[in-house]
Image: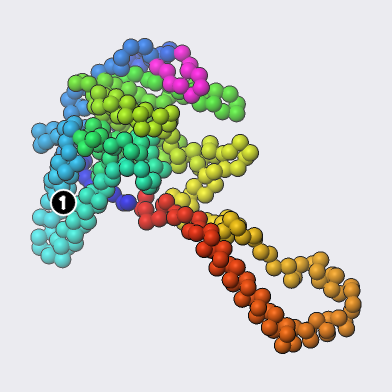
Amino acid sequence: MRITGTFALSLSLGAAVAVAGFSGFANAGKPASGGKKSGGGGAAPSASAAEVNKLKAVRLGDPKAGTFKWGMKPEEVMAQARTAVEAKYEQRIDKARQDPGLQQRIRDEMARELTAVKKSFTKFEGQKSGWDVSIIGPEFQQNTSEAVLVTKEDIWTRYFFFFEDGLYKMFLAFNKDAIGGKSFQEFGKGMESKYGHAKEVYRDDKTRGGVTHKLDHYEWSAGGGDRMRLIDRSEFYGVYCLVLYDGSVQDRVNDRRKVVNPGEVKHDQLVEGVTGKNSGSKGSDIDDDIIDRVVGKEAKKPGADQGKSQDIVVDSSNLPGKATASSSGSGGGEKKKEMSNKNSPSSSSSSSSSSSSSSEEKDAAKKKGGKKGGDNPMDGLEL
């Protein structure tokens, strides 16, 4: 599912940082164990209300032109998205008024973009899709009344998340050009210079060499019960993401998830599949075909096409052992006899009977085995 869209937002990602403001987090929190996260005590600092409001702006980071509001229905968000897309193309269409052909091509481009936004709306009702192994994989669960709508904007891709048909979260994945090669810490400092001082939250990653204490995300409170996080998704996807959400609704979402999917811990399946974290206890990797599944190509293992009741048949006519036995046994006379038998009517009849029997056995095995292999869950998906 390829998504396009717009909502440009001008962000200043300057490297200027108030070093004194950051130093208060130098010793924030004790290292957690078992992959848990830790940070400084108390609530997260408040982000600039004016800057946070710009994140909700429908057009060009200008809240005066309208904003996305929590609780909006999917169709309301789509209508706002349409307005923004049309505004983006308005100037290009006007400049091409002397060239009707070019003007029509621009209009067609706009129409494709609007169609893509509309088609991106997806309800997570239990059917696995490309979203489960995408950058937003950890942000939702199946069968919990959650849904997503996606638009691609100038500096990021914006994912609108809904709970019970109400907007409650926006996930903004920065384009690599917007990141400009900065490390997560450097990028975080740029965000602090814009939104204000943040709380740093660390996690402990278990590795073969021990435990690594690593910065997991920056966190702000955003006023009115809103919360905001800057998270690092660069290990596999090469980008950083800003997540703004209604805290009270997120709590309700979490409660629903515990009831519907008790004990489930949401991970990034694509990352864990590629990095080998899904390996079985005996060394087998349950995601050894993860790349094929993502690109929609199914690589079948030996015997995968055959029913459980069938054996894998190997042609042994050319095996070295048989050839040696044949040549060292009866000699040339036996070879002539074997060739004569092959050309005899009885041999032909036997071969035909054997072939017919083999065909019937295969047909019976297919009927008994039913549908083979299962449908590829990635069929028809465009990531």
**350 or 14: nearer the viewer:** 350
Q: Is residue 348 magenta?
A: no
SS under mark 1: helix
Q: What sort of colour scheme is used for the picture?
A: rainbow
Residue 44's quadrant in the figure? top left
Say whether residue 127 is left or right of residue 6.
Answer: right
Characterize the local packing of mark 1: few (<14), some (14-19) or many (20 or more) Cα atoms within 10 angstroms.
some
Residue 68, position as x, y percentages in the image? 17, 35
Q: Is residue 270 visible?
A: yes
> Which residue occupies 68% across, 64% down?
314
Q: Is residue 32 magenta?
A: yes
Q: How many marks?
A: 1
Q: Position of residue 317 (x, y in %)?
A: 74, 71
Out of 372 and 101, give the one closest to the viewer: 372
Q: Nearer the viewer, residue 135 or 126?
A: 126
Q: Which residues are magenta?
A: 30-39
Q: Residue at x 68, y 79 (%)?
A: 351
Q: Which residue is mark 1?
A: 89
Front-lying residue, 373 or 184: 373
Where residue 154 sits in the image (x, y, percent)?
25, 43
Q: In the rendered image of this protein, does residue 72 appear above or below residue 3?
A: above
- Give the vertical position of 158 relative to 357 (above or below): above
Res 17 seen here:
no
Does residue 290 appear left or right of residue 347 in this picture? left
Residue visible at 27% across and 48% down in the picture = 120
Q: Where is residue 228, by image quadrant?
A: top left
Residue 121, horizontal then vertical, whole percent = 25, 46
Amino acid at circle 1:
Tyr
Q: Residue at x 13, y 64 (%)?
A: 99
Q: Main secondary structure of the magenta part?
A: loop
